[in-house]
């Protein structure tokens, strides 16, 4: 509740001291008595208001309502109370807003009325602020319009633009009725259009004129035009000699130019983009201000890429080159930032030129202009942290000949023999990263002419090492690991290099470790866990290499513990490994705060209750920071600090903040927060305070709401090329957050709320049978709605790719259950039970059976490589699957119980038995309940077995045996062992590995311990 | 990233009293955008504001192990004024240490014509965290 903002209002100064004191002391009974007296003698309604206000502070419901009734009277009678009374009323019902009282139906209109009557008063501004903070756009817009009228043609231009901004916001808000939406849209556009015309047609505009003057005003106009106008209007204004993008640029305003280009890009208007960029950049050269003002990388990129897409692209591209050349001649005068932009622009341009222009002779030397440019760029920037990211896209575009020249001819020559060691090391780390990148590029493979026996999975030949390969080439990955490790060891053995590390942009060991780690992951066979992936991690993945990767990266984190990207990578790997408590230890120091919680929290918390519910049993509530972030930001209906943006006249910020706020309220992460906490609470029989639909954070979310996924994978290291999936897709427990999954989760929680609903203890309806009838109707309605919605979301085209297989089963079973319950409860006892019920029941049983089967009979994928893998490991990494079995079983069990208890209640109420349920329904439910009961015993047994298995001795040795598997080289020639040895050297030997293995096993034990306490009923 | 301030008046006679100055609370440039002059640009803006507000100097705290930031500030004319012992609760590079010292670095502004608020041997002046506020 937002009462924190409400201090007790000051009473008018004319009020006597005695009453003032009683009021400020909160002596409500005295206030009531005194105020009543004053009202009677002074005949001033203000005292009535004070009295009512004091009464509302007492406990009785009737007294509380007094204020509400008074407000309602005012609203209806169209009378306007004075502002002091409004303030008193607002304070008195501060706790009711958004729940019992809609501001927009009560105080908003009163404030609007007051402001309209007193637009010149400084207090009218306060009314606007109050309405904005309650996000009552209708009243706010009215106030702003009155203010605008009152202050028209004064030097404070904000009133006019507040009014327009609010009219626009209203026109795109759900608060606007469909009937008036068009009016407000037109109003906003027309007002701005008039202002734009005024600007265009006046020689000079004064601040008192109602034209467009500031950058924010002009950008507001274009934003509104983009939303409500036509493309032609937008483009024509964008070209206009006064308000257009170029003329604004000439005044030193870049925002419109950038926003305009973005809009044109969405329309694919390449000619226009090209012309705008050319004009801007030419102006830069001729202009009086710094020529580099326009030299944003984005602008160069758009210039080059549009030039390659226009009709006469050859001459356009030559023009780009010519302009760029002139800039490069000036480069020495540019600051470091622009120098780099120009170098990148040169790369971009070179890569957009058609290959024939670049290499007319078609020679195969590979030293093409593209490679030369890359070399020149790296010559300046290879030591920079961003070097790899700057060039990786371009390198992935090169042909194999070019690649070979770059890697073997150009890079090694960047430094000569005598260069200092730290620089050489940095360069070598970069080379390793590029080598890795290239293993993800298809042009490094060529089709094999004859596929030898047993090589069916390797249909290509690697052009680097000539061995048969698929993408990535395993031979190259192994060589890369060995190479990187040599470099790594060399650094560790050289004091000069070690001492230089703090001065380098990045510890080169970190890069080398990432290369080795990701190479090992690829070698292990890890692939994105799409729904068609195996049922167990180990069906796809070679445990030895996978664990080596984790071990190696973990060891690196000890060296560079401040590195976020490595830490995040490890968090994901440990989650995949089923070591949630250890992942949490790594996650906590990231100390993710404020707004980025929404985008980063899913990286740890998504599916966490199904992986390790025990984590929620810690001393500090697991998801508290996330919850309090949302409570703080979404408690008020208005975007946080929106008034600041109004006060600053920052209209584009107002629009951006509103959009951001809207997305935050519809964030998949919000839903994840609610659902994960509820699931964990249920695991331990905790009390769920409020039904999910009633939860303030789920307010306004219904089936039509598109929930937005803003998960940010940017902070992950990403050595992959665009030719394959990014690394985070390999590491996730399943598909990322999505609208579909969030809705299914929301609906499933609503279904469980229905099953678990218990009327309040003191609820004793006087007419029991009527109440029972109403309850039944409500239940049937809810079931029908949920069944439809669940089915809808399950059948959306994208849904299968948004869920893991166990999740699909869980939600499918819930949709079947809701349909089954609907039939069970709505079929009169005397009618035959529709066949659909038994069909539904059959589907439930078979879906559930395969969910259980696939977990309890997990096979070893490859008996050979996995023969050291303790069988408990097969399940330890699949706890979310186990959770799905438990959740499904409980949903079945509670659904059956719901039906049976309904039947019992009916029998108790109506002794004739007529209102009870059909015998077949009852027996069907009993069968389902029994089935669920059995499954729960299985789940319990599984947890028990895991606990026993983990209690056995010898785990460390077993893990060590897996990590450094001896004598069973995968490819039969011991190369596996070489890699193992390399890892062992990098991590610093067996003793440290043992310590690490201890942590892994301990985390498994902790996870299973948490599972051991989970209720199975 | 920074603000203008002075010590509360009650400390006026303390040897650690700070007259009107600008304080850099935090400057961070995204790692991939470093060494392009952005940090310098931001800091210079604060210095302009400090001069405009007639401040004596600009100051900041930095971990003694943060070589890059120290080099950055030195390149812009800042120097160590004193060492605040155990200012930070943990050590940024050595997890076995439970605290780390800070350098209090300063750059005199136009008002400090005689350089009264800086000193050459600042590394030798040690104070406790309780002496700074
Ligand atoms: C300190 C920091 C803000 C510098 O920002 P920046 O934008 O990279 O710095 P600039 O490019 O403006 O550097 C200006 C000058 O400072 C010096 N400098 C900056 N970084 C340096 C480094 N890593 N090593 C040596 N000198 C450095 C140089 O003299 C540089 O000029 P040059 O590039 O022409 O040689 C940045 O490194 C950072 O965000 N660090 C992490 C956060 C932090 O420690 N903040 C300070 C704590 S208050």
Image: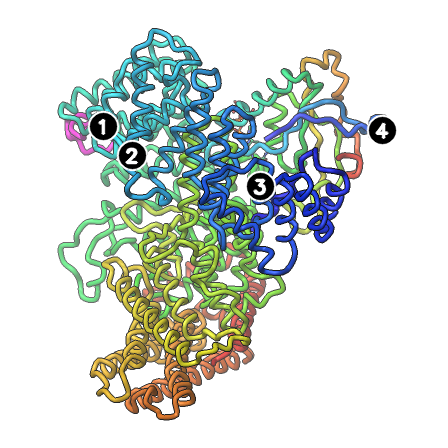
Could you say whether the residue bearing mark 1 is in a helix, strand or loop? helix
Determine crowd level at label 4: few under 14, some 14-19, many 20+ residues with C-alpha closer than 10 A: few
Coloration mode? rainbow
| Along the line of sight, the residue nearer the viewer: A644 or A445 | A644
Disc 4 to disc 2: CB gap under 8 Å: no
Question: Chain letter of disc 2?
Answer: A
Mark identifier at residue A498: 3
Q: Is residue A527 visible?
A: no
Which of the two labelled residues, at mark 2 and mark 3, occupies the earlier sequence position? 2
Let me know if residue A367 is in the magenta part: yes
Circles 4 and 2 on the same chain: no
Q: Which residue is mark 4?
A: B14
Place of residue A865 in the rendered image (x, y in percent of width and height, measured from the top left): 36, 71
Q: Which residue is mark 1?
A: A306
Q: Which residue is mark 2?
A: A183
Circle nearer the viewer, 1 or 2? 2
Determine crowd level at label 1: few under 14, some 14-19, many 20+ residues with C-alpha closer than 10 A: many
Judge left or right: residue B12 versus residue B63. Answer: right
Q: Which residues are magenta?
A: A352-369
Say if A262 sits above or below A892 in the image. above
């Amino acid at each position: 509740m937002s009462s924190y903002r409400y201090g007790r209002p000051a009473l008018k100064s004319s009020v006597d001291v005695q009453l003032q004191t009683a009021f400020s002391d909160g002596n409500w009974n005295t206030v009531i008595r005194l105020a009543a007296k004053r009202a009677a003698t002074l005949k001033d309604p203000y005292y009535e208001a004070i009295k009512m206000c004091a009464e509302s502070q007492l406990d009785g419901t009737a007294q509380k309502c007094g204020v509400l009734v008074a407000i309602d009277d005012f609203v209806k009678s169209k009378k306007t109370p004075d502002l002091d009374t409004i303030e008193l009323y607002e304070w008195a019902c501060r706790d009711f807003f958004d729940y019992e009282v809609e501001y927009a139906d009560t105080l908003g209109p009163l404030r609007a009325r007051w402001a309209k009557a007193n637009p010149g008063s400084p207090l009218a501004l306060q009314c606007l602020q109050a309405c904005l903070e309650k996000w009552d756009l209708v009243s706010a817009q009215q106030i702003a319009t009155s203010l605008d009228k009152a202050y028209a043609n004064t030097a404070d231009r904000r009133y006019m633009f507040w009014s327009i901004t609010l009219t626009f916001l209203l026109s795109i808000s759900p608060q606007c009725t469909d009937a008036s939406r068009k009016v407000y849209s037109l109003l906003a556009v027309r007002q701005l259009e008039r202002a734009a015309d005024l600007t265009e047609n006046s020689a000079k505009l004064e601040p008192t004129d109602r034209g467009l003057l500031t950058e924010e005003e002009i950008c507001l106009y274009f934003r509104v035009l983009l939303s409500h106008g036509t493309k032609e209007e937008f483009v024509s204004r964008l070209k206009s000699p006064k308000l257009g993008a170029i003329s604004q640029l000439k005044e030193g305003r870049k925002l419109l130019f950038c926003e305009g280009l973005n809009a044109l890009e969405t329309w694919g208007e390449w000619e226009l983009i090209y012309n705008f960029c050319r004009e801007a950049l030419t102006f830069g050269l001729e202009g009086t201000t710094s020529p580099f003002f326009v030299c944003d990388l984005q602008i160069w990129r758009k210039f080059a890429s549009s030039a390659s897409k226009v009709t006469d692209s050859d001459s356009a591209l030559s023009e780009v080159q010519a302009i760029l050349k002139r800039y490069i001649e000036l480069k020495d005068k540019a600051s470091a930032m622009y120098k780099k932009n120009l170098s990148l622009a040169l790369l971009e341009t070179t890569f957009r030129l058609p290959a024939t222009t670049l290499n007319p002779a078609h020679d195969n030397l590979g030293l093409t202009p593209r490679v030369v440019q890359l070399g020149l760029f790296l010559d300046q920037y290879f030591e920079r942290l961003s070097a790899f990211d700057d060039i990786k896209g371009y390198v992935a575009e090169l042909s194999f000949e070019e690649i070979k020249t770059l890697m073997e001819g150009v890079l090694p020559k960047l430094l000569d023999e005598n260069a200092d060691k730290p620089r050489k090391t940095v360069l070598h780390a970069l080379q390793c990263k590029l080598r890795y990148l290239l293993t993800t590029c298809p042009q490094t493979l060529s089709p094999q002419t004859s596929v030898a026996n047993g090589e069916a999975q390797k249909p290509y030949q690697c052009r680097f090492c000539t061995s048969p390969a698929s993408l990535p080439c395993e031979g190259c990955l192994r060589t890369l690991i060995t190479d990187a490790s040599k470099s790594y060891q060399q650094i560790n053995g050289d004091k000069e290099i070690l001492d230089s590390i703090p001065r380098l942009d990045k510890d080169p060991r970190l890069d080398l470790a990432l290369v080795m780690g990701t190479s090992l992951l690829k070698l292990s066979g890890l692939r994105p866990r799409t729904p068609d992936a195996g049922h167990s991690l180990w069906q796809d993945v070679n445990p030895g290499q996978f664990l080596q990767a984790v071990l190696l990266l973990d060891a690196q984190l000890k060296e560079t513990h401040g590195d976020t990207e490595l830490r995040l990578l490890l968090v994901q790997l440990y989650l995949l490994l089923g070591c949630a408590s250890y992942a949490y230890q790594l996650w906590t120091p990231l100390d993710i705060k404020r707004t980025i919680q929404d985008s980063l929290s899913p990286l740890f918390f998504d599916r966490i209750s199904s992986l390790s519910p025990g984590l929620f049993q810690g001393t500090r509530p697991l998801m508290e920071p996330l919850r309090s972030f949302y409570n703080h930001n979404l408690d008020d209906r208005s975007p946080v600090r929106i008034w600041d943006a109004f006060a600053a006249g920052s209209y584009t910020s107002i629009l951006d903040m509103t959009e951001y706020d809207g997305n935050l309220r519809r964030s998949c992460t919000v839903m994840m927060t609610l659902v994960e906490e509820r699931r964990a609470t249920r695991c331990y029989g905790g009390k769920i305070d409020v039904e999910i639909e009633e939860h303030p954070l789920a307010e306004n979310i219904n089936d039509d709401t598109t929930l937005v996924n803003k998960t940010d994978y940017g902070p992950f290291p990403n050595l992959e090329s665009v030719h394959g999936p990014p690394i985070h897709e390999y590491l996730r427990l399943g598909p990322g957050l999505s609208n579909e999954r969030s809705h299914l989760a929301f609906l499933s929680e609503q279904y469980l709320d229905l099953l678990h609903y218990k009327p309040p203890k003191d609820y004793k309806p006087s007419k029991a049978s009527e109440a029972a009838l109403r309850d039944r109707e409500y239940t049937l309605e809810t079931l029908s709605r949920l069944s439809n919605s669940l089915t809808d979301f399950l059948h959306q085209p994208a849904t299968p790719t948004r869920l893991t297989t166990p999740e699909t089963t869980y939600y499918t079973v819930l949709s079947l259950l809701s349909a089954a319950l609907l039939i069970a409860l709505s079929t009169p006892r005397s009618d035959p039970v529709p066949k659909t019920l038994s069909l539904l029941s059959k589907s439930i049983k078979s879906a559930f059976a395969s969910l259980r089967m696939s977990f309890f009979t997990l096979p070893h994928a490859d008996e050979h490589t996995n023969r050291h893998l303790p069988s408990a490991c097969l399940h330890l990494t699949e706890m979310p699957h186990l959770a799905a079995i438990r959740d499904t079983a409980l949903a079945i069990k509670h659904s059956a119980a719901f039906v049976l208890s309904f039947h019992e209640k009916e029998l108790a109420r109506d002794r004739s038995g007529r209102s009870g349920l059909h015998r077949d329904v009852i027996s069907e439910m009993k069968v389902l309940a029994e089935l669920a009961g059995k499954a729960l015993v299985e789940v319990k047994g599984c947890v028990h077995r895991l606990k026993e298995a983990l209690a056995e001795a010898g785990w460390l040795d077993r893990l060590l045996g897996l990590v450094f598997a001896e004598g069973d080289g995968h490819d039969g020639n011991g190369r596996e062992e070489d890699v193992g040895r390399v890892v062992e050297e990098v991590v610093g030997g067996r003793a440290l590995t043992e310590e690490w293995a201890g942590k892994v096993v301990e985390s498994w034990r902790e996870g299973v311990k948490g599972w051991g306490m989970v209720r199975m009923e | 990233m920074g603000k203008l301030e002075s010590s509360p008046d009650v400390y006026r006679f303390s040897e650690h009293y700070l007259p009107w100055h600008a304080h850099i609370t935090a400057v961070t440039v995204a790692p991939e955008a470093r060494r392009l002059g952005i940090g310098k640009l931001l800091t210079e803006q604060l210095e302009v504001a400090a001069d405009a507000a007639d401040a004596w100097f600009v100051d900041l705290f930095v971990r003694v192990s943060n070589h890059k930031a120290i080099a950055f500030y030195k390149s812009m004319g800042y120097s160590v004024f004193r060492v605040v012992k155990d200012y930070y609760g943990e050590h940024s590079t050595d997890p076995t240490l439970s605290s780390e010292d800070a350098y209090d670095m300063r750059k005199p502004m136009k008002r400090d014509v005689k350089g009264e608020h800086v000193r050459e041997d600042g590394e030798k002046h040690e104070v406790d965290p309780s002496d700074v506020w």
